[in-house]
Amino acid sequence: MVFSSEILPRLNAPYLICGFPGSGYVGKMAVDHLIQELNATHLADIYSTSFPPQVLIRTDGTADLIKNSIYYFENTATNTAPMLLLTGDSQPGNPDSEYILAEEILDIAARFNARQVFTLAAYITGVFVEKPRIFGTATDKDIVQSFREKEISAMDGGSITGMNGIMIGIAKIRGMKGACLLGETSGYVVDARASKSLLEILLSMIGLKVDMTSLEKRAKDTEALIQTIEQQMAGKTGRMLEGQQPGAQNRSSNTGYIS
Amino acid sequence: MVFSSEILPRLNAPYLICGFPGSGYVGKMAVDHLIQELNATHLADIYSTSFPPQVLIRTDGTADLIKNSIYYFENTATNTAPMLLLTGDSQPGNPDSEYILAEEILDIAARFNARQVFTLAAYITGVFVEKPRIFGTATDKDIVQSFREKEISAMDGGSITGMNGIMIGIAKIRGMKGACLLGETSGYVVDARASKSLLEILLSMIGLKVDMTSLEKRAKDTEALIQTIEQQMAGKTGRMLEGQQPGAQNRSSNTGYIS
Amino acid sequence: MVFSSEILPRLNAPYLICGFPGSGYVGKMAVDHLIQELNATHLADIYSTSFPPQVLIRTDGTADLIKNSIYYFENTATNTAPMLLLTGDSQPGNPDSEYILAEEILDIAARFNARQVFTLAAYITGVFVEKPRIFGTATDKDIVQSFREKEISAMDGGSITGMNGIMIGIAKIRGMKGACLLGETSGYVVDARASKSLLEILLSMIGLKVDMTSLEKRAKDTEALIQTIEQQMAGKTGRMLEGQQPGAQNRSSNTGYIS
Amino acid sequence: MVFSSEILPRLNAPYLICGFPGSGYVGKMAVDHLIQELNATHLADIYSTSFPPQVLIRTDGTADLIKNSIYYFENTATNTAPMLLLTGDSQPGNPDSEYILAEEILDIAARFNARQVFTLAAYITGVFVEKPRIFGTATDKDIVQSFREKEISAMDGGSITGMNGIMIGIAKIRGMKGACLLGETSGYVVDARASKSLLEILLSMIGLKVDMTSLEKRAKDTEALIQTIEQQMAGKTGRMLEGQQPGAQNRSSNTGYIS
């Protein structure tokens, strides 16, 4: 763990909001948007021997080791709580290391007496929908009860695997509160639309307003991409039907071609 | 490891009875029944970086990290020995961690000077039987000899893999006695019937009586489930025979289709 | 590591002779024969979290954790060097643990100022031979040069993988001498014949005589087994040729049946 | 880590040049050539439990544990910077251990206040080319800018995986500079031609001249090998075309046969 300054900022019981890279980049995109729009300050980089052993090359030709990073934001104008924002290049490569990374991130959060941990995740359904729903689970009943007024569907079974799950599970054992919010997504595309819906709900929960223009633009790109895919799939089905019409002797070869 | 109270109870040389989740949930269901019927007291939760990295979501919407838990029971009315009862959401995900978890559980047992370790396991046969047999192995010859009067078939070869095996193997090295009792099960269903037979034998060994009503009810559900499966399989065989009747020349292709 | 006595024997620069379980049990069978015929004394058991997590059940119904064991033998009658004899139920389940076990075994050998490490291994050829050859490699040139007078074929390339290799490789780094002797075997059967040939060469190198009767008996069993296999294979080839003779139209289905 | 002498040499801010074994042995061959031509002095051997657990057997019959080795070279005649040269039998077998080995090598480099780390790697294209291009990435912009005058193509995206990547990534975190140079190669052959081109560029960057005769000879062998492969592939294509000529109705089945 490498802090960008030896003098740590004083943050009064901040939220810790985690956007780990995962399905559709739903969570990571939301937190990256927050970091950018709030012009959040870099706090620390976290490296791990369990991250994929590689450097990522930037457009300027320089290379950097894969890492997770924490930024912070203090809203001096309003009385909104400050925030720790976690984003990353990768999740750990094995289960043991997920636990260890979660502990390390929560150690940092504990230094600032963080009040609550949010993990932003994807709820994969395999289908494209008009308006993504938001699902949630939490460490405490009062958080679960607050879901209803925010139009979050409280999950009542199953499990949350990976960093998004164990971050709030370990938080609970350490006496912190946590909630995992999941944006509905197909799982097929990088889904800025799900990301935008998820972020809007989160901002409403923590009482903060952020310029959404750039994320809305990406959400429209996602919509356009999904429409293109749906049209191609409809087209394929169309051609497939046409291909099967001409005559019985052609059917098998056409089907073979398509599959 | 998180104890639910800083003041540990005084238990006089208790039995440690382990119901790890495994094939047919034979062992876990037996211990969960004991915990429920005896209204056993929660002693400690054990977390491990080798458990699957996930939280389980309850019906009330709250989430908890995967764990093993130990409860205890003191029979103040009779002079039966007290018990430590272990149940869990999961077994460790790799061999190394199985050894480490076993040591950790035995550390707790050693604090109370546990007299004997029982692990309750499944003996998988791949077939459905009317009355499940109980098999056993132990660390000491006198325990093996006591199997006969309890209608436990002493195993005389092979191995017991996983937590059920190494718990008693490590117990032996640490100077404790151990026995592994295995309930015969098909391996295809959650088998409350095997669980009930196993628990009855165990209770007879430690001289304790417990209300079996709820487990017997589940055992009847298992019986009904097995009968349904057997009828479906018989039906399939019936259809298969019909398919083969029409003529000799069709036989081989039908067989090919079914297999 | 559990020593069977707190007072360790005084051994004057013993040989360490290792029979890890492996292909054809060539090495393990040779060392087990030595332990039995020399009536060697148990020195220590070595347990490892990297051994398969299981207990092995004996014929008397009792169970023991998987382990490696070291015995010792002092030849008070003659002036032959004393010996440490290592045998085991299993090799470690992952590469890292092989290094760690090798270090642990060599730590024990170093307590007695062991003069040389022998590992007994299998040289797998995939074919049955009349008289198994013995191959070898060593840490020092003088040992390699001594191979010629013992009819050991010095290897001049390739590698020795697993415990048999790294035991002598680590011995070299720690300033000890080591040799790996390999008995030629098909790799298809438990090969007491290869084991016997290997042990004879080893005994000749360290100047010791041991009653070989029981191992010779097992070697004859191996010979009988190999002859049975060879006859069956010859028979199969015969039947296959017969099956193809009757007519062209039967050929493909017969071939299909055999393969 | 085993140093060959207790008294370490004094080296004034050397380069660390790494030739890990990898695709086409492009990097390792270049560094091995440097060690041989400069008659570099052995400094240290590095062993790791993550290297494949085996000994390599030399032509004289002796065996050595798999290792990485560091040599050093001081150019007393000219004012060229001294060099640490790393070559190895193997890379670690798992990601975690790659990080740990990289740290260990950089610990040694840090003892000598190394000025810059070079890793020599392969850029795999899947095709044979006349003149291999050299690609590069670095920790600092000034190094990337210097690539242009050396005809190195600066990469502007993607990643470098394995030791060649994380060596410079960790170097950057530790405040050292690093560059990864990659020689274009097909990935199908041990490619001394790519190795020679890569080494020439490196020598030009560090201002050193080395006799290239033996490497040029091996590069010509590579060229001959590639020509043979290309001729064989051309021959195959020729036969394939002939096979398709007989008639239109056979075409599809022929194609099916070939693919």
Image (cartoon, coloured by chain):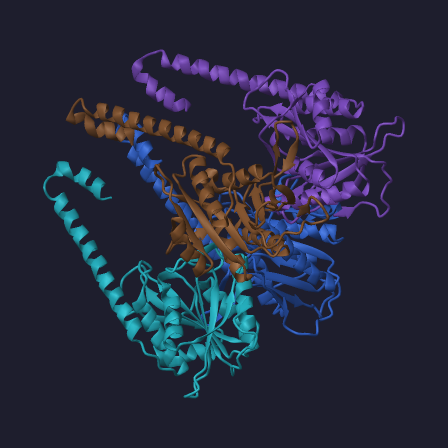
Chain colours: A purple, B brown, C cyan, D blue
x, y (%) of residue C11?
A: 51, 81
* Residue displayed at 67% across by 56% down: D103
* Residue displayed at 62% across by 61% down: D86
x, y (%) of residue D4?
A: 63, 72
Compared across the picture, whether C193 is left or right of A100 comes to left
Q: Is residue A155 above or below residue C72?
A: above
x, y (%) of residue C190?
A: 32, 62
**B103, A245: nearer the viewer:** B103
Confirm whether residue C44 shows in the render. yes
x, y (%) of residue C252?
A: 19, 38
**A256, A199: nearer the viewer:** A199
**C186, D206: nearer the viewer:** C186
**Which image quadrant: the C terminus of chain B?**
top left
Residue lying furthest right: A77
Q: Is residue C254 above or below residue C178?
A: above
Confirm whether residue C53 shows in the render. no
* Residue displayed at 66% across by 74% down: D5
Residue lying furthest front: B77
Total marks shown come to 0
